[in-house]
Image (cartoon, rainbow, N blue to C red):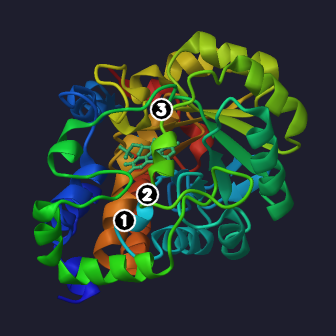
Amino acid sequence: MTKTHRLRNIYTLSDYEKAAKRYLPKAVFQYIRNGAGDEYSLRRDQQVFNQWRWLPHRLRDVTARDPSVELFGHRYAQPFGIAPTGGAAVIRYNADRLEAVVARAANIPYMLSANSITPLEDIIAINPDAWFAAYFPHDPAIIDGVTDRAHRAGYKVLMVTIDVPVAARRIAETKAGYTMPIRPNARVTLNAIRHPSWLLGLARTVAHRPVIANIQPEGGPSLFSRGVDAIGGASAFTWEHIKRLRERWPGALVLKGILRADDAAQAAEIGVDGIVISNHGARLMDHTVSPAEMIAEIKAASGTMTVLADGGFRNGSDVLTGLALGADAILLGRPFLFSCALAGRAGVEHATEMLRQEILRNMGMLGVTDLTQLSPDLLRS
Ligand SMILES: Cc1cc2nc3c(=O)[nH]c(=O)nc-3n(C[C@H](O)[C@H](O)[C@H](O)COP(=O)(O)O)c2cc1C
């Protein structure tokens, strides 16, 4: 089946997941899809949007509609971006680069995860607007080394993922045989062989001797080595580290993983430039609040910080809901991974274009011509 054929029956962002289920081996599919615990939060992050209904304005001229948004001094064409996803390379050869290239062409934000196999220098070379999403241990020498490296490479936005104090455990991927370091058992290997075009991509990835490229100042542990075990939570990484980072990092500093208003207020006090209201796609702990329902409360405590949100946003209406509640932009993770798995660059372009059209159409339906006109008064809950 050709790449374009795989996109034939895709009408919504959620359709990528259904299609990718056939295309990816079970262990890889579950690694992307699954959430923590019984996956209550994973389901609820999407269902939470059912609590709001739109109150559209009528008889306004909506011929010219502008969905652009300014974030950290750059005007992006769309109010959504590609969230950082570690391990993206397991879905397709060069997945990080493919996402970064599409984001650059579409002028949408792209975040490279520290937990990826593509060196941060390679990504900024193809996408000068990329943000770097770091996972930091408590060791200041490593933090300084990685931060200096990102600065030297030319990154202007440093996102720090702050919601993994201890390693997460996800049941569905574990049952399906997904392991890090990669140690496929016989069942996983047999299943992988039944997905030959995916396997070909993995073979190309493996031929380049992949290492986790951005968690250390230089080098990094191989995907096949025990060293990757060490990536799994920074239990002694605290607000003191953020204060120090604020003093050292000259660019925009963004904390990803805020779920409480008082944490947002503390970030604002330290001089952080932005936050992402996020439960990490419900991958860390079950029964957390859903990010969308926290936007209004957290925004009110955020002062002048830029407020982003992610987790369960699956269409243009969801994105506009997040913005109407007070977010400046919304990030999406899994839909871009699944679309990339299916059709590489064409898949990510397809997802970006579908979301762009949904947002433009819904802005028209709401009687809104630019995003500053979105406010909670457009929503009834
Ligand atoms: C496979 C996968 C890997 C992820 N890796 C990271 C990561 O390395 N760093 C990070 O901050 N968030 C990571 N996330 C979380 C995403 O950045 C984002 O918060 C989440 O995917 C948003 O939810 P959504 O997938 O429902 O859009 C990952 C998510 C997925 C699905």
Residue under the point 24% across and 61% down: 184
Which residue is identified by label 3?
A: 278
Residue under the point 81% across and 42% down: 144
Q: From the image, state whether disc 1 or disc 3 is nearer to you.
A: 1
Give SS at disc 3. loop
CA distance separating discs 1 and 2: 6 Å
Residue at the outermost bottom position: 2
Label 1 packing within 10 angstroms: few (<14), some (14-19), many (20+)? many
Q: In the rendering, at what x and y percent does residue 262 appear?
A: 61, 10
Which residue is identified by label 2?
A: 87
Residue under the point 32% across and 70% down: 341
Q: Earlier in the sequence, mark 1 or mark 3?
A: 1
Q: Quadrant of residue 354?
A: bottom left
The answer to whether residue 287 is left or right of residue 266 is left
Which residue is identified by label 1?
A: 90
Q: In the rendering, at what x and y percent does residue 381 appear?
A: 32, 20
Q: Is the shortest distance between ligand 1 and the CB of mark 3 under 8 Å?
A: yes
The answer to whether residue 125 is left or right of residue 376 is right
Tags 1 and 2 touching, CB below 8 Å: yes
Amino acid type indicated by mark 1: Val
Q: Is the shortest distance between ligand 1 and the CB of mark 2 under 8 Å?
A: yes
Label 2 packing within 10 angstroms: few (<14), some (14-19), many (20+)? many
- Indicate whether 275 appears above or below 341: above
Q: Which quadrant: the N terminus?
A: bottom left
Amino acid type indicated by mark 3: Ser
Q: Quadrant of residue 118?
A: bottom right
Residue under the point 64% across and 19% down: 264
The answer to whether residue 338 is left or right of residue 75 is left
